[in-house]
Amino acid sequence: MQLTEKFASQSTNLSCGKKQRQDGSYFDYVELTISSSSCLRFQQVENPSRDKLASIARMISSRERLCSQQAREILILWDGYHQSRKLSEPLPTPDSSVICFSLNAAINYYLLEVFKRRDFTIQEGKLKISKSEDDITRQAARFSQRLTREKRLLLYCQAAAGNEGSTSLKLQEFKPERDFLGIGAVDFPSRLASTRNFPLVFNSSFFLLELADHLNPFSLLGEHYNLLIRDSVIESPAIYRRAALVNSPGGQWQLKKPGIQDFAIKLGDKFYDLRDFSLNKLSSRSIYNRLFGLKERGCTCSRTPEQPGYCHLIIIGRDLVGYAPDGGAPIPQNGFVLALPAEELNPEEAAAQRINYHFASGAEYHQGIQAGPALVTGGSRVLTAKSLKEEEFFSAEALAHPGDCGVTPTDFASDIDSTRAARLLLGVKDNGDLGLLGVEGVSLAVKIGGKDLSSGVTLKELADLAVSRDYQRAINLDGGGSTNIIYHSQPLISSAGLMGCQHNEGFAGERMVPVVGLLNE
């Protein structure tokens, strides 16, 4: 535990503790109590670090070595654009089933197709698309050249090729869906704290982390999803009905469980109340998220059903990123699909404007973040195995269905009192102050001198700890390797993933994230 009391101020108070278990294990925790009058807000990373791609490549490589997995010979990473960055003209996918507005999606579709065909080489550390009269290959070459010109492309090899022959051997091991990754805007919380002089920065919501999370070409590794409210603007709506903390105009923080049907949406010049839409059911007006198919088939579906005469609009955050004429749209893990009669809306006109969301009930909130599950309400633990399922946490592993990508976060354990991990919660205490409670935990892959280390906690233990610390309501934030609290440029707990590792050692124990909580004093 790296806690120090010297940074306490009038608006914050620091404390720490240790809990011993009967089995001899223990966990360390740190709590930062924040005055209710302080300005706590949430925001997406806007200016990611320049060495982002190299850092992520090193982290992927290091994680695989620690976990005794076979190292990937070659990674091709590219720095994605904001989802609001659109193509100058809509572009059909290589199979013409979907129309892309998103520059990111078009890059993914076309380069993936070329990689699958093996119409490329790597020469002197540079990607070369094969010359061809084929429209798909020519378009992929243009995208590759653009990424290279803008310094958005990284070819990362585990070891120097040595000669052209060994490079060819490495390319045989290249698996496009696994080894070609578009990366969203992410950064280290510590870097945000030091460069922007925020006294407090911490990770907050879940984001796309595993391979199953971003197999959809419209999604990028590291992208945030679910409710985010910043300065009264809903930057992204709730996709799944999970616990959120929202701040009313009067300054009171409330625990809510919003879902996609709780919103009204302005799309182009049209207004839609999503309460009037069927959720994950084929009808005249439908909404689809990645839970589609779970109740009926026992597994999640990656595409919407075919629906002639209808337009299936693919939406991520505040942007219409593409559509599928006659249905069959890929459902992004960090977005949803809106199905409307084709004659009702011109997708190209709608895509030219950012989407606006409002709560259909008329409720207004100034700040808000959604993660889950809910841990405490009314001063008592409300977390149960049933409540975890009610908040729509499912993993592909728990479903045990081959090929099922699950629902984000796809690696979330389906138990409440078995899996120990580093954890982080945000809540409201008895006196109305906010509380940020972090528990230190370390990956089983990390060994440090044979010493006993803080083991982390289960979700149930975290909820019980919150009750003992006088929380009236609290939600779980993203934990595990993401758990991080930076206070006055100092980490309050060690990294859960790679404790003790520094940025200059070739990989970082600290994980990059897309959305952070910030405190202005």
Image: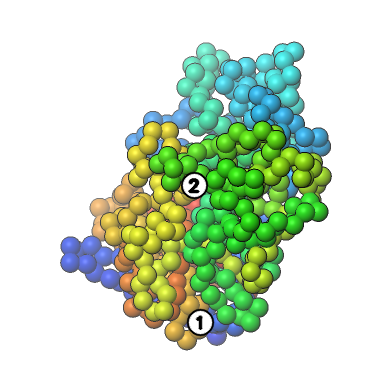
Q: In x, y percent, where is residue 20?
A: 24, 69
Q: Name the one closer to the observer, 289 or 449.
A: 289
Location of residue 36 with respect to 478 vertically, above or below = below
Residue 142 falls in image quadrant: top right
Q: Residue visible at 52% across and 20% down?
A: 171
State whether residue 205 appears in this view: no
Q: Is residue 501 left or right of residue 442?
A: right
Residue 50 placement, left or right of 23: right
Spatial CA distance of label 2 from label 1 is: 36 Å
Mark toward the start of the polypeptide (2 vs 1): 2
Reply above or below: 197 against 59: below
At 61% across and 47% down in the image, what residue appears? Answer: 286
- Which residue is denoted by mark 1 in the rendering? 433
Residue at figure coordinates x 75%, y 13% from the top left: 133
Question: The C terminus appears in which quarter of the rendering?
Answer: bottom right
Q: Which of the pair 45/510 is nearer the observer?
A: 45
Q: Is residue 459 above or below residue 38?
A: above
Q: Amino acid at mark 1?
A: Asp
Q: Residues within 10 Å of mark 1 (few under 14, many from 20)?
A: some
**Percent position of residue 185, x then y:** 63, 49
Residue 6 rendering spot, x and y as whole percentages: 48, 78
Q: Quadrant of residue 214?
A: top right
> Residue beneath label 2, please?
291
Question: In which quadrant will I find the N terminus?
Answer: bottom left
Residue visible at 55% across and 63% down? 258
- Tell me the element at label 2: loop
Query: In the rendered structure, which amino acid carries the disc numbered 2?
Result: Leu
Is residue 358 visible in the rendered image? The answer is yes
